[in-house]
């Protein structure tokens, strides 16, 4: 296999974890890779560490840029990537030494656009299995059917961007796909579009990625910005489906309504948040017209839509949460 893989690593304030991450990529059994280290204006020694590694291995390319956030850093990597395939690795995580080789093997052998592997959480250096995975060792399907699993089958974790290999052309054919700058939940704006473009996808039930739960990580409260960005990616579903076929419009209509209703279920929403949700109610109801004819609707979604339409949903949720 002579295909070049571009491994893109966005970097910000991860001095403690960065070397383990880079080492795990340098030690890959598949050697024909380029490693793009995007120093996103990190105020610690990350930039220096990147340059030290670049001096040791000519497969490493370093970008030093002003801080623009995770999405902006990933986008910078995508734009300069020379590879036929792209893998994203977060800079506080690390990967199995065979990840590149195995994901590329399945991509080439079965001529698929995306291969997704399983992952483990790492707590204090202890591995914990990810329960949201397929039962089969290998699961094949079309990108459109994987998109349906992504939105309608919550037993499978398909949302994250970093446990996959992508054919690079997916980001550029027909329309360019980049991560939204300055938004929370950047994967929610992006991954579904890649699935929709993919002709064929493989889900591989083998742990090849290690997601590190950092000791110094601060658990973010759900803020007004979190809520606003959540509403933004819901609107993005409608925007994306505007010029698409009826099937994708039907999928996105159900997905958007379900996501909107789920926002009400978040604990500890304050009055400002409820008011923001209510401001979007008319928009969501307008976009949900024809729901009864949508082949992906079910009794539950129709029931919840009726509760929303007649101003009962908010009170129903408040009572249920008591």
Image (cartoon, rainbow, N blue to C red):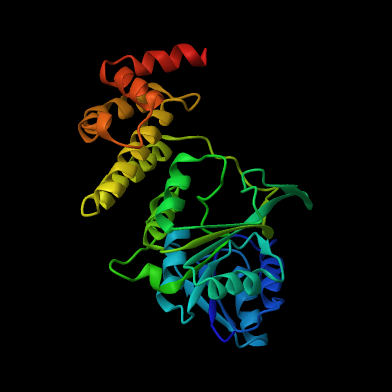
Does residue 293 lie above or below 314 as drawn?
below
Q: In this figure, what is the number of numbered marks?
A: 0
Q: Position of residue 1 (x, y in %)?
A: 59, 84
Does residue 41 lie above or below 125 as drawn?
below
* Front one among 28 and 45: 28
- Quadrant of residue 231 within the rendered picture: top left
Task: Please give the name of the residue rendered at 62% of the width and 44% of the height, measured from the top-left corner.
Answer: 132
Does residue 31 lie above or below 74 as drawn?
below
- Could you tell me if residue 37 is visible in this image? no
**Residue 146 appears left or right of 256:** right
- Quadrant of residue 67 within the rendered picture: bottom left
Q: Position of residue 96 (x, y in %)?
A: 71, 66
- Could you tell me if residue 22 is visible in this image? yes
**Residue 290 appears left or right of 300:** left
Q: Position of residue 143 (x, y in %)?
A: 43, 58
* Front one among 213 and 251: 251
* Front one among 41 and 91: 91
**Residue 82 appears left or right of 174:** right
**Residue 291 appears left or right of 228:** left
Task: Please give the name of the residue rendered at 54% of the width and 75% of the height, measured from the top-left corner.
Answer: 108
- Quadrant of residue 2 within the rendered picture: bottom right
Task: Please give the name of the residue rendered at 33% of the width and 24% of the height, measured from the top-left corner.
Answer: 302
């Amino acid at each position: 296999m002579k295909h070049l893989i571009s491994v893109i690593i966005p970097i910000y304030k991860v001095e403690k974890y960065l070397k383990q991450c880079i080492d795990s990529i340098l030690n890959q059994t598949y050697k024909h890779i380029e490693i793009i280290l995007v120093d996103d204006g990190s105020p610690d020694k990350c930039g220096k560490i990147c340059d030290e590694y670049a001096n040791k291995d000519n497969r490493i390319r370093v970008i030093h840029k002003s801080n623009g956030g995770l999405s902006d850093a990933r986008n910078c990597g995508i734009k300069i990537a020379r590879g036929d395939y792209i893998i994203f690795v977060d800079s506080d995580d690390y990967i199995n030494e065979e990840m590149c080789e195995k994901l590329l093997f399945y991509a080439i052998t079965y001529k698929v656009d995306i291969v997704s592997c399983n992952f483990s959480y790492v707590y204090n250096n202890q591995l914990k299995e990810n329960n949201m995975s397929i039962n089969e060792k290998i699961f094949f399907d079309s990108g459109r059917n994987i998109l349906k699993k992504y939105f309608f089958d919550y037993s499978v974790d398909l949302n994250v961007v970093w446990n996959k290999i992508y054919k690079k052309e997916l980001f550029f054919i027909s329309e360019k796909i980049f991560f939204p700058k300055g938004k929370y939940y950047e994967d929610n704006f992006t991954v579904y579009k890649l699935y929709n473009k993919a002709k064929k996808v493989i889900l591989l039930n083998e742990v090849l990625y290690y997601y590190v739960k950092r000791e110094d990580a601060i658990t973010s409260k759900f803020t007004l910005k979190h809520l606003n960005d959540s509403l933004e990616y819901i609107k993005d579903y409608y925007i994306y489906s505007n010029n698409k076929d009826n099937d994708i419009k039907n999928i996105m209509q159900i997905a958007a309504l379900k996501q909107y209703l789920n926002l009400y279920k978040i604990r500890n929403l304050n009055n400002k948040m409820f008011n923001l949700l209510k401001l979007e109610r008319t928009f969501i109801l307008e976009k949900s017209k024809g729901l009864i004819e949508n082949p992906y609707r079910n009794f539950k979604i129709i029931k919840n839509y009726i509760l929303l339409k007649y101003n009962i949903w908010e009170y129903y949720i408040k009572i249920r949460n008591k």
